[in-house]
Amino acid sequence: MLASFLVTLLGPIFHWPDIMRQLSIFEHYGAPLVDGLRLLHVASLLAVAGVMVTAATWRFTRKDLLR
């Protein structure tokens, strides 16, 4: 999360290419109160979060906690 914030903060200052700034989660979320909600971007963020939760759950169920 901190790296994503730093990309958003420092990208315009150092004139990083747009492809680099697109790596930030804040770039995808935008400012919904000002610009409105970007449904495609929010859906992609939810999809990534769903994949991460699924992977974490799968990994946790395979972990042997007694060992």
Image (tube, rainbow, N blue to C red):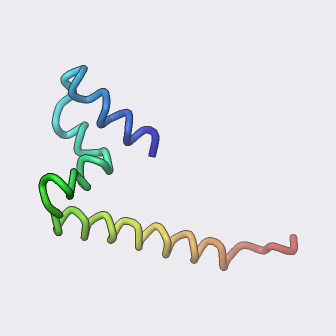
Q: Position of residue 31 (x, y in %)?
A: 21, 51
The residue located at (30%, 27%) in the rendering is 10
The residue lying furthest to the top in this view is: 14
Which quarter of the rendering shows the C terminus? Answer: bottom right
Q: Nearer the viewer, residue 63 or 47?
A: 47
Q: Position of residue 5 (x, y in %)?
A: 38, 39
The residue located at (31%, 31%) in the rendering is 9
Q: Nearer the viewer, residue 40 or 19?
A: 40
User: How many numbered discs sit on the rendered protein?
Assistant: 0
Q: Nearer the viewer, residue 15 or 39?
A: 39
**Left or right, residue 67 beside residue 26:** right
Note whether 32 is above or below 39 in the view shown: above
The residue lying furthest to the right in this view is: 67
Would you identify the image quadrant in which residue 35 lies? bottom left
**Left or right, residue 64 beside residue 23:** right
The residue located at (19%, 40%) in the rendering is 19
The residue located at (17%, 67%) in the rendering is 40
The residue lying furthest to the front in this view is: 33
Q: Position of residue 20 (x, y in %)?
A: 25, 37
**Left or right, residue 31 beside residue 45:** left
Q: Position of residue 47 (x, y in %)?
A: 33, 71
Note whether 20 is above or below 59 in the view shown: above
Would you identify the image quadrant in which residue 24 lies? top left
